[in-house]
Amino acid sequence: MSENDKRPGAGLLAVGRISRPHGIRGAVVVERMSDFEGRFAPGARLMLEAGGKLSEVEVENCSGHGDRLVVKLAGFESRNEVERLRGALLEVPEDWSPALADGEYWPHELEGMKVVSTEGRELGRVSDVLENPAHETLLVSGGEPGEFMVPFVSEFVLEVDPASRVITVNVIRGMVPEP
């Protein structure tokens, strides 16, 4: 569950953001937004959104660089060429994403869903899905109790109903701010 930054209506999922050039031969440092193995493998095709334009690019090579990647995109040969790509998104069409197992969801599918307690009390809507080492966490906001977080684990998230866009949660003491 981590190809997460869907642009509404665009049908594209952001899988990385270019933070800066790396070296002098056209490589860039990419903040990874996807944990799909092979997304940045040599030969992988991505959509580059830079300066309001969208173009298809191919990954020439990729290596790890701490928690980021150093990616060389085909056709970019100098630091000057990639300097303008700072902040640019690397995206894929939604249908290029791998199928998920039952009970798994892309973060963009959960965002905006209504969150209710087991008693039916509306608590707000999912405003973000935060990636953590152990599990994802739903950030819920816009409801009467204020902003709070729900670990996306079966102990707390009892049901996700994509058809009605409702998530039912088991609220424990201290999870939701008291009015």
Image (tube, helix red, strand yellow):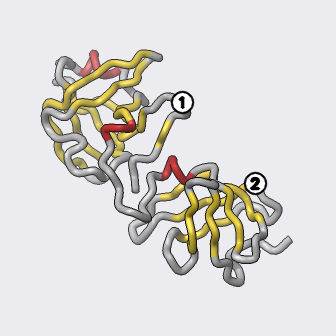
Q: Which residue is mark 2?
A: 142
Specify the quadrant that holds the N terminus: bottom left
Find the residue positioned furthest to the right: 179
Q: Is residue 83 above or below residue 105?
A: above
Amino acid beneath label 2:
Gly
Q: Residue at x 39, y 37 (%)?
A: 94
Q: Quadrant of residue 55?
A: top left
Q: Earlier in the sequence, mark 1 or mark 2?
A: 1
In the shown orientation, is residue 4 left or right of residue 171? left
Q: Are marks 1 and 2 in contact (CB under 8 Å)?
A: no
Residue 26 picture location, percent across and down: 21, 24
Specify the quadrant that holds the C terminus: bottom right
Q: Which residue is mark 1?
A: 9
Disc number at residue 64?
Answer: none
Residue 69 picture location, percent across and down: 25, 44
Residue 71 picture location, percent across and down: 22, 35
